Image: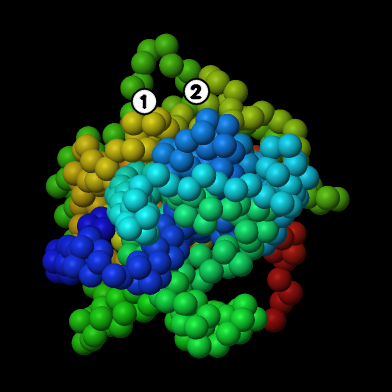
């Protein structure tokens, strides 16, 4: 992911040079500097907020709490140590990050509207704390912050350069995160958190890390801002309007992008200054900002930069069409590509258990409905095992219990001899359990290649900070795409593919985990009939490369031709099991699918 495109670099360098040169070229620009200080502050906050709310999609409406924490950290320590608050910016950043880490461990358990409301409650809670801890914060009276020791003739210039430097560092932090595996994982969480977990992304660690990092620029800026204002009180430090403004800044510019929040921060600060000078009063300023927010949501919901980018891409793509997979290309790919790219990471040792997966007395109830009722089954290592049954028999629910999407009411799941019943979804993926879904769940805002480099075989700090395309992931992703016949689509947006193409991309995505067993949930549904034979070829190749397969499918001829052993599920229970030859003519299976009336002899004409 090239965060900074080459054509824009010259413009960015020129803008930075102009900002650096302003105080030198125009010494009497104290008013302009004060306006730009607000621009820098809003851009810093919007960029920090973007790390959790833009990338991961967790919208925080109380994120300015970390600006207030930075302000009070600077003010209290400056008073205690008799130093200037501006020198305590690193401590402000550290305290804000630690507090965010602790808060994130709690609030990030919630999602959507609940998360939004809780973040506002956190902001108001800190406001009340600051107002009531008078011995520490000065209460409602606030704290006076020691003023700088530099010459008065310098005015705001030192603040100007320090805050500009902090803005540059914040943008660098955002760019680093976006280029890293952490950034890829956060975007995956924004698209589909459940699917992200199923491909090995430790969503809890990723979200808490991003939340803590997002507070760092706030805390550093807060310590400086306390000295710039010369006074800190609860209402000023924990103002909810500041949170609204920084959210508006990110929305205007385009959240989830690198430069959108920066541009939005400048625009919001300039709008605020304009409304203050020419409209008069806080109420007029809030009204203008409210109107701007409504207009943005109605006419530019993705923000300025994404809207311009989309318009430009539509113009370039006019007259072109998305390519579709050719059956012959898949046939060539599955026979010519080296299967080492898709080989299971688990070596079949002599001491490895024969049963790679065991489900023991699995029960799953939803209220008074029992979807899975005492199911026990085994999947032998190196086999292709089928799981069939009529609609509503509990097949997908059983898959969800095996992979950890659902917590079973009772029962056990054993993978390669280890009980994983209580393991997290991503831990099961790390242990070699891969899974596709009945309705494809790709990360639609990402390219096909990004979808394939997002899966993680493990979670570690080194893995998170590694480049998105570092190591051998890209080469192996391209090999897997070639194996699936999708090599021409790596730069294509996943949302633009056909349903059948998306099915194949999802299977390719799972292969990046090199799973020892793959659970395929109706892989042939929605696929062009001409591709079903090629899908069977892909599954056989996977099996030959050492991957065990458990497949749920309604295409009975496909199941009978592929599988070594078949389990039949009906009304949440195992009806029977056996070889394809035994299942084909089993009267209980026929009755379960067709109903008892099919056995009634038809009347004479």
Image quarter (top left, top right, bottom left or bottom right) of the C terminus: bottom right
Q: Residue at x 73, y 37 (%)?
A: 135
Helix, strand or loop at label 2? It is loop
Residue 562: which quarter of the image?
Answer: top left
Determine which residue is flagged by label 2: 416
Distance between the alpha carbons at the discs numbered 2 and 1: 10 Å
Q: Position of residue 428 (x, y in %)?
A: 51, 33
Q: Position of residue 40 (x, y in %)?
A: 38, 62
Camera-nearest residue between 156 and 233? 156
Q: Residue at x 37, y 38 (%)?
A: 464
Camera-nearest residue between 327 and 503? 503
Determine which residue is flagged by label 1: 346
Seen as rendered, the residue at the extreme top is 351
For residue 155, side relative to residue 125 (left or right): left
Seen as rendered, the residue at the extreme right is 368
Pointer 2 with pointer 1, Cβ within 8 A: yes
Q: Residues within 10 Å of mark 2 (few under 14, many from 20)?
A: some
Q: Residue at x 25, y 66 (%)?
A: 27
Q: Position of residue 188 (x, y in %)?
A: 44, 53
Number of numbered markers: 2
Q: Vertical placement of 360 versus 198: above or below?
A: above
Q: Which mark is residue 375?
A: none
Camera-nearest residue between 514 and 248? 248
């Amino acid at each position: 992911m090239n965060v900074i495109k080459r054509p824009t670099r010259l413009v960015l360098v020129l803008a930075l040079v102009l900002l650096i040169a302003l105080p030198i070229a125009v010494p009497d620009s104290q008013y302009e500097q004060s306006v730009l200080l607000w621009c820098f502050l809003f851009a810093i906050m919007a960029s920090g907020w973007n790390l959790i709310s833009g990338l991961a999609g967790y919208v925080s409406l109380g994120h300015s709490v970390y600006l207030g924490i930075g302000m009070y950290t600077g003010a209290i320590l400056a008073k205690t140590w008799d130093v200037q608050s501006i020198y305590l910016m690193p401590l402000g950043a550290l305290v804000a990050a630690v507090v965010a880490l602790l808060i994130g461990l709690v609030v990030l358990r919630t999602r959507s509207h609940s998360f939004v409301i809780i973040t506002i409650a956190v902001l108001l809670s800190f406001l009340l704390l600051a107002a009531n801890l008078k011995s520490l914060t000065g209460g409602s009276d606030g704290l006076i912050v020691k003023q700088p020791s530099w010459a008065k003739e310098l005015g705001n210039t030192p603040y100007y350069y320090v805050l500009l430097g902090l803005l540059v560092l914040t943008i660098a932090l955002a760019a680093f995160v976006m280029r890293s595996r952490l950034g890829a994982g956060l975007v995956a969480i924004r698209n589909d958190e459940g699917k992200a977990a199923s491909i090995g992304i430790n969503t809890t660690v990723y979200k808490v890390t991003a939340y803590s990092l997002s507070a760092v620029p706030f805390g550093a800026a807060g310590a400086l801002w306390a000295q710039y204002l010369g006074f800190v009180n609860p209402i000023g430090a924990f103002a909810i309007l500041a949170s609204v403004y920084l959210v508006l800044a990110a929305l205007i510019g385009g959240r989830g992008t690198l430069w959108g929040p920066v541009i939005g921060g400048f625009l919001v600060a300039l709008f605020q200054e304009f409304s203050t000078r020419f409209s008069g009063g806080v109420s007029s300023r809030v009204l203008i900002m409210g109107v701007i927010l409504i207009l943005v949501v109605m006419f530019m919901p993705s923000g300025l930069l994404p809207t311009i980018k989309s318009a430009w891409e539509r113009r370039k793509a006019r007259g072109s069409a998305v390519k579709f997979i050719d059956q012959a290309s898949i046939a060539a790919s599955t026979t010519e590509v080296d299967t080492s790219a898709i080989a299971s990471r688990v070596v079949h040792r002599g001491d490895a258990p024969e049963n790679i997966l065991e489900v023991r007395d699995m029960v799953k109830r939803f209220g008074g409905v029992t979807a899975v009722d005492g199911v026990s089954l085994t999947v032998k290592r190196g086999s292709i095992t089928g799981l069939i049954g009529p609609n509503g028999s509990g097949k997908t629910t059983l898959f969800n219990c095996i992979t950890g999407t659902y917590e079973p009411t009772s029962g056990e799941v054993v993978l390669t001899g280890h009980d994983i019943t209580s393991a997290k979804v991503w831990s099961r993926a790390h242990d070699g359990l891969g899974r596709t879904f009945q309705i494809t769940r790709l990360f639609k805002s990402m390219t096909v290649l990004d979808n394939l480099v997002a899966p993680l075989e493990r979670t570690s700090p080194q893995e998170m900070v590694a480049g998105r395309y570092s190591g051998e992931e890209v080469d192996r992703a391209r090999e897997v795409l070639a194996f699936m016949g999708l090599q021409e689509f790596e730069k294509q947006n996943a949302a633009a593919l056909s349903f059948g193409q998306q099915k194949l991309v999802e299977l390719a995505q799972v292969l990046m985990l090199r799973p020892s067993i793959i659970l395929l949930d109706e892989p042939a549904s929605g696929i062009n009939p001409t591709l079903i034979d090629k899908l069977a070829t892909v599954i056989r190749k996977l099996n030959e490369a050492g991957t065990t397969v458990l497949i749920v499918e309604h295409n009975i001829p496909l199941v009978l031709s592929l599988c070594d052993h078949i389990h039949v599920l009906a009304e949440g229970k195992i009806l029977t099991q056996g070889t394809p030859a035994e299942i084909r003519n089993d009267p209980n299976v026929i009755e379960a699918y067709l109903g008892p009336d099919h056995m009634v002899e038809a009347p004479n004409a």
